[in-house]
């Protein structure tokens, strides 16, 4: 129990020195006891690391913005971006964009986020527009870069946007035309029915079929045929 508490304390205290710690633990072949944990680790490794070891073992990060070295930062730990906390600009340069917005704005597909190398990192946040939903937030600058990889150029993306808008317009038009046609058909058939009700047939000239000895006349409006004999 004591050992656990001790090592937990130990590990939170020196996250960045994992590699150094591992070497001390295993390479030396001894297991830390409580005393070691309190005394040896903080004094010998954390506070006075062997300079050469310390420098070699830690991945040194350089900020893309200010070129300063930094150990860890918000943008690096969350997005693998080489930007120190001092240079972080969450309003403009390093602002976040939701996946949904990135999809509609830049016409990206799921595979463009997750399958293409490198897979883009994201944060998960509660969706403010939907009580039970979550949303994935990406670094917009990384999305922009990915967009160019997918579409080749901004112009291509623009063209695709236009093409899709036109297609949508066409579909809308088609739907409208279809509706109008249906409407016309309905009106026509109801007019037709209406005409037949109480319709006074308007017969054309009568014709005589001598074989059947039968007379026929046809309504000029509805086409109804009337056969009759004459005595
Ligand atoms: Zn910086
Ligand atoms: Zn008729």
Image (cartoon, grey):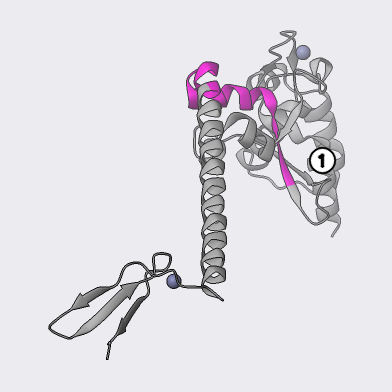
113 or 28: nearer the viewer: 113
Q: Residue at x 68, y 41 (%)?
A: 25
Q: Of helix, strand and loop, which one carries label 1?
A: helix
Q: Can residue 96 be seen from the camera position used here? A: yes
x and y, in percent, of residue 150 in the image: 49, 27
Q: Which residue is mark 1?
A: 12
Q: Quadrant of residue 26?
A: top right
Residue furthest front in the image? 231
x and y, in percent, of residue 163 in the image: 50, 29
Q: Main secondary structure of the magenta part?
A: helix
What range is drawn magenta here? Answer: 135-158
**Quick check: is 155 in the magenta stretch?**
yes
10 Å crowding of disc 1: few (<14), some (14-19), many (20+): few
Q: Residue at x 81, y 54 (%)?
A: 4
Q: Residue at x 51, y 53 (%)?
A: 181
Where ligand 2 lies, by image quadrant? bottom left
Quadrant into which the C terminus falls:
bottom left
Quadrant into which the N terminus falls:
bottom right
**Quick check: is 72 in the magenta stretch?**
no
Q: How many marks?
A: 1
């Amino acid at each position: 129990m004591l050992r656990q508490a001790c090592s937990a304390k130990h590990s939170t205290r020196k996250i960045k020195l994992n590699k150094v710690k591992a070497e001390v633990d295993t390479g030396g072949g001894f297991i830390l006891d409580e005393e070691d944990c309190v005394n040896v680790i903080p004094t010998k490794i954390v506070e006075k690391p062997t300079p050469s070891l310390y420098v070699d073992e830690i991945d040194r990060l350089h900020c893309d913005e200010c070129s300063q070295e930094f150990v860890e930062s918000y943008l690096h730990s969350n997005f693998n971006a080489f930007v120190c906390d001092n240079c972080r600009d969450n309003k403009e340069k390093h602002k976040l964009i939701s996946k949904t917005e990135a999809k509609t704005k830049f016409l990206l597909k799921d595979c463009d986020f997750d399958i293409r190398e490198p897979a883009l990192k994201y944060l998960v946040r509660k969706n403010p527009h939907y009580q039970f939903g979550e949303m994935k937030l990406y670094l917009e600058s990384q999305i922009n870069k990915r967009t160019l990889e997918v579409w080749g150029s901004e112009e291509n993306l623009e063209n695709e946007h236009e093409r899709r808008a036109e297609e949508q317009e066409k579909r809308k038009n088609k739907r409208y035309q279809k509706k109008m046609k249906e409407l016309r058909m309905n009106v026509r058939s109801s007019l037709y029915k209406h005409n037949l009700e109480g319709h006074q047939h308007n017969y054309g000239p009568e014709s005589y079929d001598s074989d059947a000895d039968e007379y026929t006349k046809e309504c000029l409006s509805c086409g109804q045929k009337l056969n009759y004999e004459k005595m």
